[in-house]
Image (spheres, helix red, strand yellow):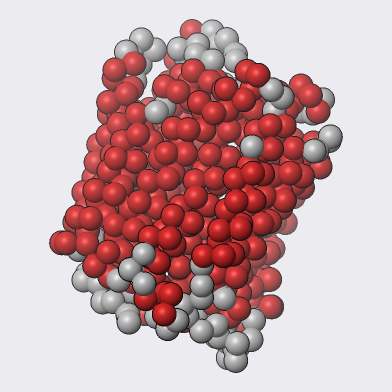
Amino acid sequence: MPEDLQHPSYKWIVLTVTTVGVLMVAIDTTVVILALPSIIADLHTNLVSAVWVIMSYIFVTTVLLLALGRVADLYGRVRLYNWGFAIFTIGSALCGFSHTDWALISSRVVQGIGGALMLVNAWAILTETFPPGQRGMAMGINSLTFGVGGIIGPVLGGAILAIASWRWVFFINIPIGILGTFFSYRCLQESARPLSEERLDVLGAAAFSLSLFSLLLAIMLGIQLGWLSPLVLILTGIFVLTLLLFIFWERRVPYPALDMRLFHSRVFDFCVLAASFQSLALFAVQFLIVFYLQAVRGDTPLHAAILLLPMPIASAIAGPISGRVSDKIGPRLPSTLGLLLQAFGVYWLSSLTLTSSYLHIAIGLALTGLGGGFFFSPNTSAAMSTAPPERLGVAAATLATLRNIGTVMSFAVTLAVAAGSIPRDIMLQLFVGTSVNLSVPLQQAFVDGLRTALHVSAILCLIAATFSMVRGQEKHHG
């Protein structure tokens, strides 16, 4: 190992650089949602295209994670993390200069590629750099940035949109991205030898990506067109066929895109299952409460985003604490406790009525955020610690991919609940941040649907807690 990598300060440099990258991605997500009404007006686009400004980023990030994780194992995680910083910065510039909706959506795809490269390699680099006794703490600080991003995003977005056009929501990333790319290139070094003797399984990676893309697109279009529409059925068929091809091929190729030996670890399996169910449960909660604040309470999109702050603030506080606790007593108990807290917080929110006070909402959001902070870093640290050093990229990609699938499916649940309670055009207006006025009967119908969806989310949190509790003891690799 190079001498610089053994220096006591190096791991903190790694944590700083990776945390800045994650923070930039986290802020960007929140800011873009707030900017959608301005984007629609300026680009003369429609609600459906505005939805794809958000979903194109999520789609490409999810679809490419596994392939990029494998590429990182083969050619160097630090190298690909550097590329991620640069590509995300270029994508931000392209977004800011876009003059049509499709140009903006395409630029968001470029951003998504950069975001995927940073996300999948940040966890792997941290796992390589920090010893097992400090890994939970490092993951906790890194995950704290998601909460901080949730706090900064609405405030920064509101300030930018108050004095400048929506384009500056993207331009603000450029100086941060340039500095991040520079320091990442200068400060980070490869600590593991890339597996240059192995080859990239192009067919396996392509089959998996196509299968996943077909599934996610079928879910989104199923809400718009109906689950039995010909296009949705065709996409479902493509998903099944390409998934079967992927499984068939991976069992026969010498260097598979997804090393099935990762799933020989009970801890890894149950960590991934817990993360998937947690993301399936929780992403819907945030959007449903935003819809509630706007449609029932009449809050503006910016005010609604600010009212959500108890969730990311609690998560940001709990993350580092949970990481340090997990380093001392192990990850299983803190992550399980976090999921139980989330289940209780979501169940608390399910009791909302047309006249609930904000204190009632804030308590539920704080409990949910607190639980998320306690769960994320110990669970991620435990999953990554089971992977052999030469498979850290694929391990991180597998965990992130299944979390993102849960997120997209949770998003679909949100839209399905809203669409079953209120007219579709009103639902899309709520999603893109346009203020709407609902009649009392429609408000009540939405609250009834919200209650049912949150009951389901609470049950999913309890299932995730069960997976977390029964996973067994961690065994660390080198």
Residue 299 seen anywhere in this rendered image of the structure: yes
Quarter holding the N terminus? bottom left
Determine whether 370 is above or below 320 in the image. Answer: above
Q: Is residue 114 visible?
A: no
Residue at the location (36% across, 64% down)? 9
Q: Residue at x 79, y 24 (%)?
A: 42
- Residue 295 placement (x, y as % from top left): 51, 16
> Is 279 positioned to the left or the right of 119 in the image?
left
Residue drawn at 33 percent across, 68 percent down: 8
- The furthest residue to the left: 329
Identify the residue at horizontal 71%, vertical 24% (top origin): 165
Left or right: residue 372 versus residue 344 is: right
Frontmost residue, 151 versus 350: 151
In the image, 241: left or right of 152? right
x, y percentage for residue 15? Answer: 41, 58
- Along the horizontal axis of the image, is 13 left or right of 439? left
